[in-house]
Structures are given as C-alpha cells and as structure tokens.
Image (cartoon, rainbow, N blue to C red):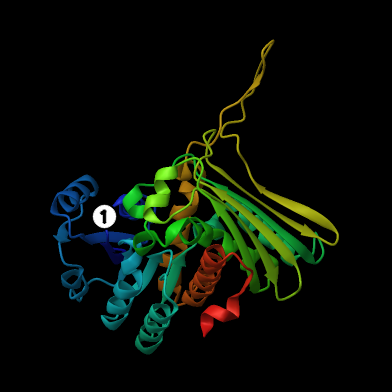
Amino acid sequence: MGIRFGLIGAGRMGKVFANTLAYSVAEADLVAVADPDAATLDEVAARYGIPTSYTDYHELLAQKDIEAVVVASPTGTHAEVITAAAQAGKQIFSEKPLSQDLKACDLALAAVKKAGVKLQMGFMRRHDAPYADAKRKILDGVIGQPVMFKATSRDPKRTSLDFARREHSGGMIMDMGVHDFDLARWLMGSEVTRVFSEGTCLAFPELKGVGDIDNAVINLRFATEAIGNIDMSRNAVYGYDIRTEVLGTDGSLWIGYLQQTPTLVLTRGGVIHDTVPYFMERFGAAYAEEVRVFARHIVNGTDPEVTGEDARAATAIGIAATLSLDEERPVLVSEVEK
C-alpha cells in the first residue's frame, strides 16, 4: 500500500492530478476526493475509482488515515486550504499560486512551519526535462554568468470571463505570469527587484469588462543587475507557445518548442508542421513528475526543493507587476512588501 492521498478540488486541474495520482505515481494511493460540486465530485470519484468523496474538504482532512493531500481547489482558496491541511497534520502538495495576497501567504507558511509538515508548490516547469536540463547546465557554468532572461508565454485561447476576474485568478499577469516569475528567479539564480508592465486588450475586448487584458510585456530587473523580459498573450491562435532563453556571458540556452511532432511536410506550397495544442500536451509529463517527486520526499523524509517561500516570491513579483500595469510605472518588488 502506498501513501494515502486525498485530493481537494475536482475541477480542471483536479482532474489532472486525479489522473496522475491514480495512474502515474507508484507510491500513491488516491483514497478520497473533496469538491463542493456534487456532480463533478461523483464524476471524478467514479472515473478514477476513488472510494470516498466529500463536498466539504474539512471532512476529508479529518480522516486520520489520509497522510497527504493535493490542493487543486480554486486559486483564491489555496492559502486557506493549505493552512487547514497543515493544522490537520497532512503533507501538502499545492497547485500554484500560494495566494494572490502576501499576508495570506505568510499565514499559510506559518501554519506549515508550526505543524512541521512538508509543502511543495506546483511549479511544474521545474520538473520538465528541458527546463531541468537547462538549470543543470547553468549551474555547471556552460553559459557563464546569466545576464538576460527572456520568456514567451502564450495561450491559444482566452480563459472564461468569470475566471479572468482578479478576485478569482488574479488576472492574466498573476495567473499566467507566475510560472515565468518562478522560472526567472530559479534559472537566473537571483531575486527580481523591479518590474515594469505594459498591457493591452485588443484581441478580446470583452476582457476589459472584467478588468483583465489579453496581451502584456513585463520587463524585469534582478538583484545581480541582470535584466529580463516576459511577453504573454491569450491569443496565440497558432498553438500553445512556451519558450525561454537565458543569455550568459559565455553563451545562451534556448528552452522549449513550438512544433509538437518531429514531422515536416514539404510541398510546392511551402513547409508545414503542427504546433503544441495546449498545456497538457506540452507539460503532461512534468505534472506527473512533480507529484512523483513529492511522494518520494514523503517516503525518504526529505524536504521539497520547490517551496512555499518560492511561491511567495513569485506572488510578490506578480503583485508588483500588476501594480505596475495599473499605475503605468516601474515598481520595486519591495514596495508591495510594505
């Protein structure tokens, strides 16, 4: 018998983690799921053979035989659920972000520390083979000292209007950008100290009505005096486009790809190839690997490398970048810490 896991949240990401826990993590035994939507709950429990289900996640946390939980509840509830899970003595894996609010981050992290439990955050790109290889090469000095970070983060379609509201997702910069903010810190080996955001809403003007945007460019300044740039979009009609470059004093690393399969069609009309359709086709293996890594940390009694503190730092950058967008000025990340 493996580690007895409970899943909190059975929506889009909850289904991803249910599939991972049920079929891809040998150390895991998915024994319970919680979601307030009874129909969704019944569907997920039946599909993945989960024996116990609850509409109130507190009931799941009260089960003494559940050792660990995966938190895939709505974005705005992560800190609350993490706090409750820590107080119940559970080992915790949580989807990003930790919270959209730094005080909520701090309360959750304090609860985790007090309980002495593990918390691993779901920044799955760190567990993607190309990104992990890039990090190793940077540490080995292959490209020298990193001096510039560049990221492209483009979705092929917009999110729902309800999810786009800041009170639900944090807005595009927080929701999409948090992965790139984490990668920037991780790959560059330095904290982001200043951001300057520009955004617009031209592809989907209806997003203006809920206070969001569909395209943005964010410039970064690091503590090492390195610089960076992130472009993000909700209207990459050609496919899911996630790519990163780290420029160093002795070379450059390019990470990611747009072409899904290594097949080219060459005709008189030109060259044709497919593109990555969406996030699961690109990062499905990484989503599975991050949970396997978490399970191994539990088995081995070791601490996760992707911590709550990492998630808090990414949130702080996201808050500063959103403030920069709103006030049309550069913002020091230290400003949002006050």
Left or right: 145 with respect to 255? right
- Tag 1 secondary structure: loop
* Residue at image mark 1: 10
- The residue positioned farthest toward the bottom in the image shown: 114
Percent of width and height locating residue 318: 52, 67
Residue 45 visible to the viewer: yes
Hey, which quadrant is residue 313 in on the image? bottom right
Amino acid type at mark 1: Ala
- The residue positioned farthest toward the top in the image shown: 268
Determine the residue positioned at 38% across, 79% down. 104
Instruction: Report the front residue among 79 and 63.
Output: 79
Instruction: Report the front residue among 250 and 207.
Output: 207
Percent of width and height locating residue 156: 49, 39
Left or right: 186 with respect to 176? right
Percent of width and height locating residue 259: 60, 34
Percent of width and height locating residue 120: 44, 70
Q: Is residue 234 above or below residue 266?
A: below
